[in-house]
Amino acid sequence: MRKIFIILISFLLFSFDLVDYSMYQKDDLPSKIKSSFIYNFAKSFEWPDSKTDQFSIAILGDNSNLINYLTEMSNTKMIGTKKIIVKSYTSVSEINKPEILYILPDKSSVLPEVISKIKGKGTLLITEKAGSASAGAAINFVIVNNNIKFELNKTSAGKAGLVVSSKIESMALKVF
């Protein structure tokens, strides 16, 4: 009897390592929603011709959940025939011509420097701070009645060489 008890306890102790507890962790719903928006933006803009077989989505700032959602998405989805590559930057000097660059709120103070660096390079600039769309970002996430919406600066997108689809324009909360 004692032997059976020890085997049972041992089995229970070792079985804890076999359970994936990540599914019990709380989802970061805003990051999940924003990653879906970003993917749909990528599909809905017309991009300048590129000779690479990759589509780069870069995040400037720290949000590991958003990066994880985008990376997970990049494993199963493509933009046209291009494989999605997700990059994370901590400083403006690291930025190297991504198709989409999302500046997180913790890095919003560098917006003018980023705009100067990516000017005319076909990069869709996305931000998340009041006033950023009017300051030069093409897309700015905003919260309205606890829902994530976005503002569109069509002029900034055009200066980057991007063509905005009518679908995106109609979904925008505000168009500049």
Image: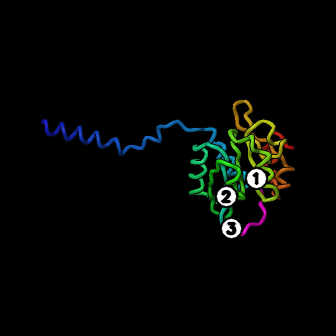
Q: Quadrant of residue 53?
A: bottom right
Confirm or deny contact between disc 1 and disc 3 (CB under 8 A): no
Q: Is residue 126 left or right of residue 154?
A: left
Q: Which mark is residue 52?
A: 3
Q: Label 1, secondary structure: give it.
A: strand
From the image, give the main secondary structure of the stretch colored magenta. Answer: loop
1 or 2: tag closer to the N-terminus: 2
Q: Nearer the viewer, residue 131 or 164?
A: 131
- Residue with the most extreme front position: 93
Confirm or deny contact between disc 1 and disc 2 (CB under 8 A): no
Task: Say which amino acid is labelled 3.
Answer: Thr
- Residue position marked by numbered label 2 in the rendering: 56
| Residue 142 coordinates in the image, percent (x, y) | 74, 37
Residue 60, placed above or below residue 50 = above
Q: Residues within 10 Å of mark 2 (few under 14, many from 20)?
A: many
Q: Which mark is residue 124?
A: 1
**Residue at the (69%, 47%) spot, across then down:** 37
Q: Is residue 31 magenta?
A: no
| Residue 38 coordinates in the image, percent (x, y) | 69, 49
Confirm or deny contact between disc 3 and disc 2 (CB under 8 A): no
**Residue at the (60%, 38%) spot, across then down:** 29
Range covered by the magenta-colored residues: 45-51
